[in-house]
Image (tube, rainbow, N blue to C red):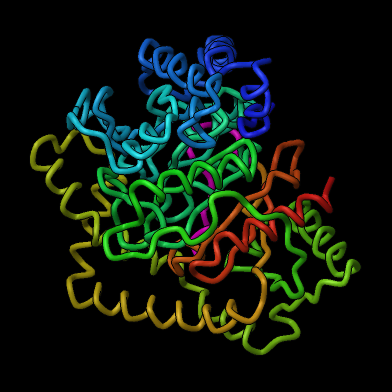
Amino acid sequence: MLTPYQAETKKFRQGTDTPRDYLERTIARLEEVEPRLRSFASLAIPRARIAADMASRRWKAGAPLSPIDGMPIGIKDVIETFDLPTMMGSPTYDDWRSGRDAAAVFALRDAGAVILGKTKTTEYAGSYPTDTRNPHDYERTSGGSSAGSAAAVGAGIVPTALGTQVMGSIIRPSSFCGAFGYKPTVGGINRGGSHDYQSHSCIGVIGASLEDMWATAHAIVERAGGDPGAMGLVGTAALSGSARPAALVLFETPGWDSATAQAREALMARVDMLGRLGVRILSRHDDARVQALETALADIRELGLSIFGFESRWPANSAMYRDKLGLSPLVHDRMERAAALGLEGYRACLAQRAALRAQFEAIAGEVDAFITLSAPGAAPRGIQWTGDPIFNVSASVLGAPSVSLPILADDGMPLGLQLMGAQHRDQHIFEIAQWVLAQSR
């Protein structure tokens, strides 16, 4: 169902395919599935066709702007675009327009990417769901908050879409929808013009392949950098090949007991396979430092929510002043808890987060990656709950890069295997992921 783009660019050079033809296949797939999938909040098809025609001429002339020149992409609807509204999944921002592109969107256009439209999000990229469905079962959620981005990629509409993650909003929906997912090192991709701006949030990519995600992220950072004051994504323009890991940490996270038996068995089967291939596997059961880290992370969900809530007071309370009834009870509750936390409580949370990051980095710097599930199991039935982010919160709060591979299954549905590692080793995580993926085929 996935539709990788990088695999098609050779045909563009040969003249046997064009970005415009690729876009027309994208639009045909959109028209086929979107009435039930509901992945897009708004579309820019006429402008997309013009952009695809321009890209087709550049590929024909042997002068593409970048590896993603002509690539259709969806933009999560908390990230500003000059030509489409940014409505953030809330009636309080109905048809709101900033009149500018976010930094990442500017960079994508500058690299020749074709903005197909804005993908649906949960309310303010939080927990209150949107109406997007799972492409593998329309009676299940696609996850959140990057619901539309994951569904559009998983359904084979677009090869990549931008998402954001402050708790589990890229990796979890990618897992549910059978797509690849990438959450970069915190600060790795410039968030200017994104309304998911909390201090451990980041813009990331959901894609049809590892190569598509890396090419997209690198094209953005090459043109817009990372967050102000941050190094940005570190790595070469193209992945340099797979890397066989010497040592991995089996990372149970606080979510281990909530995972389904089938999900745990699927993960352990892969871990055992890697062990037989000579990879050294560490875990809390045989390494004291890993055990200490797992114990220290027991309450990381609450820590992440406390920081997220306190840092959300300005936009949420501002919207509340304008339209209190336009906000869900979840936002009201989050603001009450943020007020109760107070400034000193918030500062204590930041100090705790810094200590946990140092503890994690001390281990992550000595192994190739941490390996775990991307979600506790298959996408939940119904669309009233976007699923549990417990397997994703650690990478978010720790600021660590994370990749989800769609190579596991649970209850007849896709399930992701997650790899995460030390900050700024994003490319190494991708190369480990390439090797793990090759062993799984």
Q: How many marks?
A: 0
Examine the rendering and report whether any part of residue 45 can be seen.
yes
Q: Quadrant of the C terminus?
A: top right
Which residue reaches farthest right?
276
Residue 385, image x, y percentages: 49, 40
Front residue of 256/228: it is 228
Quarter of the view holding residue 357? bottom left
Residue 301 horizontal side relative to residue 271, left or right: left
Which residues make up the magenta segment? 379-394
In the current view of this chain or complex, which residue is farthest to the left? 321
Magenta-span inclusion, residue 392 = yes
Q: Specify whether 338 is left or right of 160.
A: left
Residue ID at (26%, 48%) = 192
- Principal SS element in the magenta part? loop
Reply above or below: 222 against 10.
below
Q: Quadrant of residue 403?
A: bottom right
Q: Is residue 438 above or below residue 428?
A: above
Q: Is residue 136 visible?
A: no
Q: x, y (%) of residue 369?
A: 65, 69
Q: Residue at x 24, y 77 (%)?
A: 347
Query: Measured from the top left, where is residue 18 in percent x and y?
Result: 58, 16
Is 43 situated left or right of 269 in this image?
A: left
* Depicted 125 relative to depicted 426: above or below: above
Q: Please check the rendered image and state whether residue 238 is part of the magenta-colored stretch, yes or no.
A: no
Q: Extreme bottom residue here?
A: 288
The part of the image, by quadrant, that contains residue 19 is top right
* Residue ID at (30%, 41%): 124
List x then y, in percent, for residue 412: 76, 36
* Residue drawn where x is 45% and y is 58% of the image: 233
Residue that extends furthest to the front in the rendered view of this protein: 61
For the N terminus, give its image quadrant. Answer: top right
